């Protein structure tokens, strides 16, 4: 198949939430090396609360809108607004489309990226979630442009997100609280890029299972 039914696809967000919750300690440990150490705690709290409120029959857009509301209003730190905007803009762009195919998904994630860029000053190379998100979306688009099927493009997206995450080890943080450390921020994964890779991987896995 090259598309999935949007109705009921909101369960993908519940699956992503389970991944974030399972990695709560890991994300906080990474964040604690150059940041406040609360990234995993805040992310797990927000995603878990949203998962409890999801309608099992709801669309992916419905679920992302719920998650956005929770992240924007109920968790602390800088990542709440960033991820809240990401999911909110993706939800708004997807709307109530009957199916989710490669074109709809690609446009959806591009809309989310545009929203994140609109509210922040970071760019690729600054050691932020963009270092996972931008390569992931670019890899997805490139795979589709090359004629690869939806599932293969999702696999390319997941791999690129993980490569982008790993690239942050060698970066110096240039925005956020960790930027104050300068060269001392080098040698550590960025927590935002790490959680972003988990999220993009969750989309790839969740949609991919439903395409099979």
Image: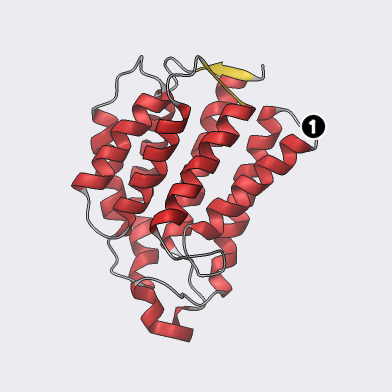
Left or right: where 126 falls relative to 192: right
Number of marks in picture: 1
- In the rendered image, the residue lying farthest to the left is 74
Name the residue that disc number 1 marks. 147
* Quadrant, the N terminus: top right
Picture layout, residue 121 above or below residue 196: below
Q: Is residue 195 left or right of 170 when viewed as pictured? A: left
Secondary element type, mark 1: loop
Residue 23 is situated, as x and y percent measured from the top left of the image, at: 38, 49
Residue at far front of view: 118
Instruction: Mark 1: give few (<14), some (14-19) or many (20+) Cα within 10 Å.
Output: few
The one of 167 and 71 positioned closer to us in this rendering: 71
Picture quarter with the C terminus:
top right
- The answer to whether any part of residue 201 appears in the image is no
Residue shown at the point (22%, 50%) measured from the top left: 75
Q: Is 88 or 196 nearer to us in this picture?
A: 88
Q: How is the image coloured?
A: secondary structure
Q: Is residue 179 above or below residue 52?
A: below
At x 63% / y 36%, what residue is drawn?
154
Q: Position of residue 71 (x, y in %)?
A: 27, 45
Residue at image coords 48%, 85%: 183
Residue at x 26%, y 52% (from the top left corner): 42
Q: Position of residue 185 (x, y in %)?
A: 45, 78
Q: Is residue 54 left or right of residue 15?
A: left
Q: State whether residue 116 appears in this view.
A: yes
User: How far across and how far down the image is residue 65, in percent?
Assistant: 33, 32
């Amino acid at each position: 198949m090259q598309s999935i039914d949007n109705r009921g696809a909101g369960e993908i967000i519940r699956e992503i939430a389970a991944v974030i919750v399972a990695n709560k300690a890991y994300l906080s440990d990474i964040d604690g090396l150059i940041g406040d150490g609360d990234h995993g705690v805040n992310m797990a709290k927000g995603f878990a609360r949203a998962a409890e409120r999801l309608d099992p029959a709801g669309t992916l857009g419905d679920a992302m809108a719920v998650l956005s509301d929770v992240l924007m209003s109920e968790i602390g730190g800088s990542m709440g607004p960033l991820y809240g905007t990401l999911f909110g803009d993706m939800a708004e762009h997807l709307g109530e489309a009957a199916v989710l195919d490669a074109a709809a998904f690609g446009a959806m994630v591009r809309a989310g990226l545009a929203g994140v860029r609109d509210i922040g000053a970071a760019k690729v190379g600054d050691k932020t979630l963009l270092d996972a998100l931008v390569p992931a979306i670019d890899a997805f688009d490139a795979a589709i442009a090359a004629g690869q099927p939806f599932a293969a493009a999702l696999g390319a997206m997941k791999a690129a997100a993980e490569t982008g995450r790993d690239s942050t080890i060698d970066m110096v943080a240039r925005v956020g609280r960790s930027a104050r450390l300068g060269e001392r921020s080098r040698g550590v994964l960025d927590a935002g890029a790490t959680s972003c890779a988990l999220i993009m991987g969750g989309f790839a896995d969740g949609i991919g299972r439903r395409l099979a």
